[in-house]
Structure formats: C-alpha cells, structure tokens
Amino acid sequence: MSKRTKLDLKRLVTPLLSAFYAMSGAILLSTLIVVDPGLLHLGAIGALSLIMAVGVFKLDKLILWMAFVVLCLVNAFSFALLINPLMAANVLLQTALVAYVIAIWVATVYLAVKWKRLRLKT
C-alpha cells in the first residue's frame, strides 16, 4: 500500500468514524431530552459518544480506552433491552439496537486494529 493510499484512507475513515460517534451521541442525547429525562444511561452513552467523536477527529491517545468503555456500556444497555420480554413486540427497536451494536463493534475493532496507522504523522 503506497503512502498516498494510506493518507487517503486516513482522510476518509477518520471523519466517518467521527461522524458516526457524533450522530449516535446526538441521537442518544436528544432521546434523553425529548422522551424521558430519567433515562440517564442514554445521556451518559450520548455524552461519551460526543467526546469520542472529538477524540477520533483529533486522534487523541485515550480514545481506544474510551471506545472500549462505550462498547461495554452499549452492549450492556442493548442486551438488557433485547432480552426484556416486554420489548419483544417492538421489532423495529430491536433491529435498530442490533444494527447499532454491530456498528459500535465494527468501529471499535477498526480503531483498535488500525490505530497506529491512523496516528501516522503526515
């Protein structure tokens, strides 16, 4: 892989990951505000996702640890909702949660595997 291809990959992937974390954080925080202020766990995941968006964009050192924390929180929250028998009727929410968990896993694994390559000084 040439240096130009690596540079183009960094320019493409970093904003995409940052946008993914920013959008998920904004959606979760808006859910906290609009639906129920008692859903503090959604607010915490949303705030961490927004911090992750800024950190991924700046390629901060601690982002891998924060990605792991966000991954654990999202997994715990999503799987708790998915095994809840009261949520069985809401297929759209279950599908969205599964898609979100898969996207978080893909983003975290990508950050972990490609971290040194993304942090190359250009």
Image: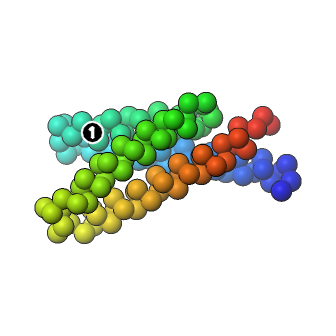
Q: Look at 59% across and 46% down and name the residue there.
A: 111
Residue 20 on image: x %, y %: 49, 49
How far across and down, in percent of the image, does residue 12 sit?
67, 51
Residue 12 left/right relative to 87: right
Q: Quadrant of the C terminus?
A: top right
* Residue 30 appears in the rendering: no
In this view, the residue in front, 62 or 12, is 62
Q: Residue 58, can we see it?
A: yes
Image coordinates of residue 38 in percent, x first then y, are 17, 37
* Residue at image location 53% in from the left, 48% down from the top: 108
The tally of labels here is 1
> What is the quadrant of residue 48 in the picture?
top left
Task: Tell me the amino acid under the disc marked 1.
Answer: His
- Say whether residue 77 is left or right of residue 109: left
Q: Residue 119: x percent and y percent?
A: 70, 37
Which element carries disc 1, helix, strand or loop? helix
Does 59 appear above or below 75?
above
Q: Is residue 48 left or right of residue 64?
A: left
Scheme of colours in the image: rainbow
Residue at 13%, 61% in the rendered image: 86
Q: Residue at x 24, y 36 (%)?
A: 40
From the image, tell me which residue sits under label 1.
41
Quadrant assignment for the N terminus: bottom right
Determine the residue located farthest toward the top in the rendered image: 61
